[in-house]
Amino acid sequence: MKLPLSFYQRDDVLAIARELNGKCLYTCVDGLLTGGMIVETEAYRGPDDRGSHAWNDRRTPRNEMMYAAGGVVYMYICYGIHDMLNIVTGDEGSSHAILIRAIEPLTGLEVMRDRRNVHHADVRLCQGPGALAKALGLNKIHNGASLAGDEIWITDNPSPEPLEIASSARIGLNFPGIYRDIPWRFYVRGNRYVSRNKT
């Protein structure tokens, strides 16, 4: 069963980012079902977070979707190459978002390999946000997609196992100050599909 929109429309983006680990993310793009268990996330907390696109309440056409009510997708392109999947959380105007950094691929592996044009071990198939979005068939046209829809959604894990959720500084932030090193990256400790940095 899909998570209700109320799951995303809470104010505590850190709690949601932690709780998303172990849940299952799916897409159905061009009729092809793909997905897996979320194993790594990063929280970005609205205008007070210097790491966020909404820092200092800089509202632009690019980040407008961050200001929607929680439960929609915010897609952006990093370095002009990689599409990045984010989940918007909180009330309308909060501008909180969670970057999905990695999943353990479980469904539609052949489809994901074809999309990425790779034939290496599956451990790298959805490891890192750019690889993940490409494997799932996501790009900027999915910006604003509802997680209550039939193209992208998240469910509870049908076979949950006890997981140890660890935290660290977020990856790739190079500015000075507390928000560079604050431990707002969450991941499943010991899971081999997590990004290799800072684990």
Image: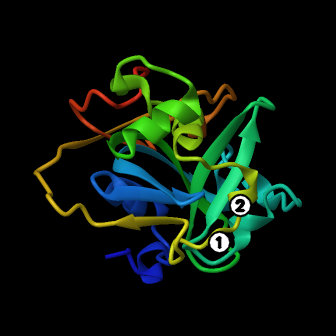
Describe residue 123's horizontal placement relative to residue 180 as left or right. Answer: left
Please tell me whether mark 2 sits on a helix, a strand or a loop: loop
Return the x and y of residue 150 as percentages of the image width and height: 52, 72
For the image, the number of numbered tags is 2
What residue is shown at x 38% (from left), y 75% (from top)?
A: 3
Picture coordinates of residue 54 (x, y %)? 74, 56
Q: What distance separates the C-alpha of mark 2 from that of mark 1?
A: 17 Å
For the point 35% across and 40% down, the residue is 105
Residue type beneath disc 1:
Ser
What sort of colour scheme is used for the picture?
rainbow
In front of the other: 20 or 93: 20
Q: Amino acid at mark 2?
A: Asn
Residue position for label 1: 94
Q: x, y (%) of residue 18?
A: 35, 54
Residue 141 lies in quadrant:
bottom right
Q: Dot 1: within a 10 Å radius of its alpha carbon, few (fewer than 14), some, or many (20 or more) residues?
A: many
Q: Residue furthest top?
A: 120
Q: Which quadrant holds the N terminus? A: bottom left
Pointer 2 local density, CA inside 10 Å: few below 14, some 14–19, many at least 20: some
Label 2: which residue?
Answer: 143
Q: Position of residue 97 (x, y in %)?
A: 58, 58
Left or right: where 198 falls relative to 74: left
Q: Is residue 162 visible?
A: yes
Q: Nearer the viewer, residue 175 or 88?
A: 88
Quadrant location of the C terminus in the rendered image: top left
